[in-house]
Image (cartoon, helix red, strand yellow):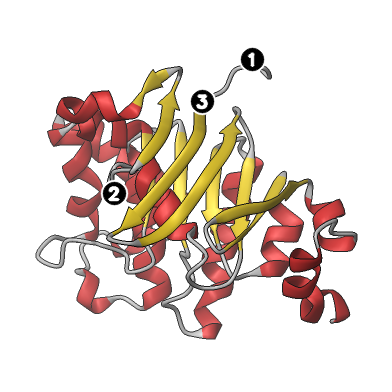
Amino acid sequence: MDGEKIISVEALSKSFGDHEVLRKIDFSVRPGEVICIVGSSGSGKSTLLRCINRLEHQTKGKILYHEKEVRDIQKEVNVYRSKVGMVFQSFNLFDNMTVLDNCMSGTRKVLHLSKMEAFDRAIANLKAVGMAPFIHARPSQLSGGQKQRVAIARALCMNPEVLLFDEPTSALDPEMVGEVLHVMKELAKTGLTMIIVTHEMGFARDVSTRTIFMDKGYIVEDDVPERLFQNPKNPRTREFLSRFIAG
């Protein structure tokens, strides 16, 4: 199982017009890994996640899911996204639905669960993120931290094999960041495979099994957090982390 790659990214490039956002990206994801991707704004981190989730189409290169090329699965893209789920910085909840219905809609429509199965799964995952008391609330009645916890529960309801997080705390007020990071730390303990784009350096250092530093569309360094944060090999990584290391 350790040798099996869930996702492989090979020589991936992405351009918007003349602007190359990703340049020859290579990395793979194995079961149980928690990979944090860090780097300056505009370094390509979120675009990389969006390519993996098929929200963007790469210009060159390959993304493989269990050795099957992802660009070939457009017809079954919703099924793929149930296996490779995504949590967005802006929550993307349905405002016209209750918390419970937000968590049940995907499992009913995509996985074709019965109403009772979808209900049971929604309640279990809302309990896991501490949001079960709010099942009848609408997103407009929730704080940002609560919305993000519901968004995580909704993604978990699909029983994903990999969960992608695109800067899940960047839209939150500072006092709400902790509650979402706590949920993510608990998820990491369950063995869920996660790829997390984050500006939270302490979280990346403490929770990731691997940390990737990106700069100007390249993967500059990919290492265990102990080495990357304490003794980065690349001068650019060192420069980026200097304030954090000094702290």
Q: Which residue is mark 1?
A: 1
Q: Could you give the CA–CA distance between mark 1 and mark 2, rounded to whole angstroms?
A: 30 Å
Q: Residue at x 15, y 26 (%)?
A: 75
| Residue 56, disc | 2
Q: Residue at x 38, y 18 (%)?
A: 68
Q: Could you give the CA–CA distance between mark 3 and mark 2, rounded to whole angstroms?
A: 20 Å
Instruction: Answer left or right for 162 relative to 219.
Output: left
Give the SS element for disc 3. loop
Residue 215: x percent and y percent?
Answer: 60, 63
- What amino acid is labelled 1 in the image? Met
Classify residue 62 by image quadrant.
top left
Q: Is residue 214 above or below residue 65?
A: below
Q: Earlier in the sequence, mark 1 or mark 3?
A: 1
Label 1: how many Cα within 10 Å (few below 14, some 14–19, many 20+): few
Q: Is residue 166 above or below residue 55?
A: below
Q: Nearer the viewer, residue 177 or 62?
A: 62
Q: Residue at x 84, y 81 (%)?
A: 247
Q: Residue furthest left?
A: 96
The quadrant of the image that shows the N terminus is top right
| Residue 24, disc | none
